[in-house]
Image (tube, helix red, strand yellow):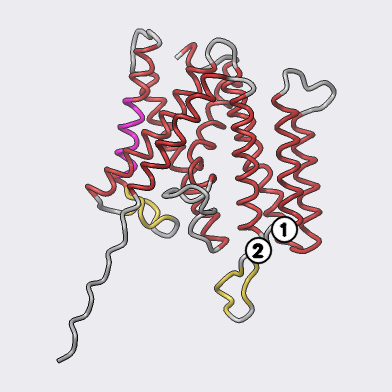
Amino acid sequence: MAAPAEPTAKPASSLTPRLISAAVLIPIVALAAYAGKPAWDFLVIAFAAVMIGEWCQMAGRRRDPAHPGMRLPAPHPAPETMVAVGLIVEGLVIFSREGYGWINPWAELAFGVAVTTLFAALRHRAAALWFGLGIVYVAVPCAAIITLRGEPGIGLAQILWIVVLVIAVDTGAYFAGRSIGGPKLAPTISPKKTWAGLIGGLVAAAIVGAATAALLGRPSPWPLALLSAGLAVVEQAGDLAESAFKRHFGVKDASHIIPGHGGAMDRVDGLVAVAVVVAGINIWSGSSVLTWL
């Protein structure tokens, strides 16, 4: 008589490592946000260095000649990765200083894109354009995040609103998607995302916006609640954009540096999109959205 087969072990839920990672990261982010310069700038620049490293490792993956539909891992550390990390750190350090002197931030960005692309072209040819895109993808949002926290008087409230909003959207989408399910939001890009999850994220963001308006003493919670709900769509779009990049490069996660979340890019994909939009609104209006909405 044959011995009974051993039961197959079920894969552990990803919720536990996600919660542990959040318990570690959230206090660090909160303390740095409260401290402001230079702690906040240092944290953002450190994340930017990791993010551009992850991007270059994805962009450096080459197609496997034996299996055209697959990609081979990039060498680590690749020369173009080290160049990109150095340029990102240098550019954001210059940007974070109180005065730029004769250096124009947009000129610095263009310089970083050009140098990274040209250096990557030595080994990657036309694919080197992805490395230049990575400089924009990382530098612009990180500069926006530094600027948003640095605004006098309102910077701390502004960055906390954005960070809590992004966490709420991710949490609301996660639980609504798992508990309700239903039609997929973008099955070819991110098969797990559902319309129910998006609605859950919208509701969570609106609650954060209403609570923020109440804490700031606004006469009505609705304007900020509606804007926050709109930013939930931006956050999910940022998440989908990063998923599309990863699918193009043939990877599931940007890296495995954060248990349960993957890489730094996987953790802040929605935050970078929201930060750029909020910074853009502030530039357009001439002041922080929290001061007039």
Residue for point 48% across, 47% down: 258
Q: Which residue is mark 1?
A: 78
Residue under the point 37% across and 30% down = 229
Q: Quadrant of residue 220?
A: top left
Counting every numbered tag in the picture gives 2
216 up-or-down from 195: above or below:
above
Picture quarter with the N terminus: bottom left
Q: In the picture provided, is 89 more to the left or to the right than 237?
A: right
Q: In the displayed structure, would residue 58 be above or below residue 209?
A: below
> Residue 291, image x and y in percent?
49, 11
Residue beneath disc 2: 74
* Dot 2: element: loop
Residue farthest toward the right in the current orientation of the protein: 102
Badges 2 and 1: C-beta atoms under 8 Å apart? yes
Which span is picked out in magenta?
197-207
Q: Position of residue 119 (x, y in %)?
A: 80, 54
Estimate how packed mark 1 is, as few (under 14), some (14 to 19) or many (20 or more) residues with alpha carbons within 10 Å: some
x and y percentages locating residue 218 in the rendered image? 38, 9
Label 1 secondary element: loop
Residue at (62, 75) in percent of width and height = 64
> Mark 2 belongs to which amino acid?
Ala
The residue depicted at 57 percent of the width and 61 percent of the height is 249
Viewer-proximal residue, 76 or 123?
76
Identify residue type, mark 1.
Answer: Ala
**In this rendering, position of residue 124 left or right of residue 253:** right
Q: Front-most of 157 and 110?
A: 157
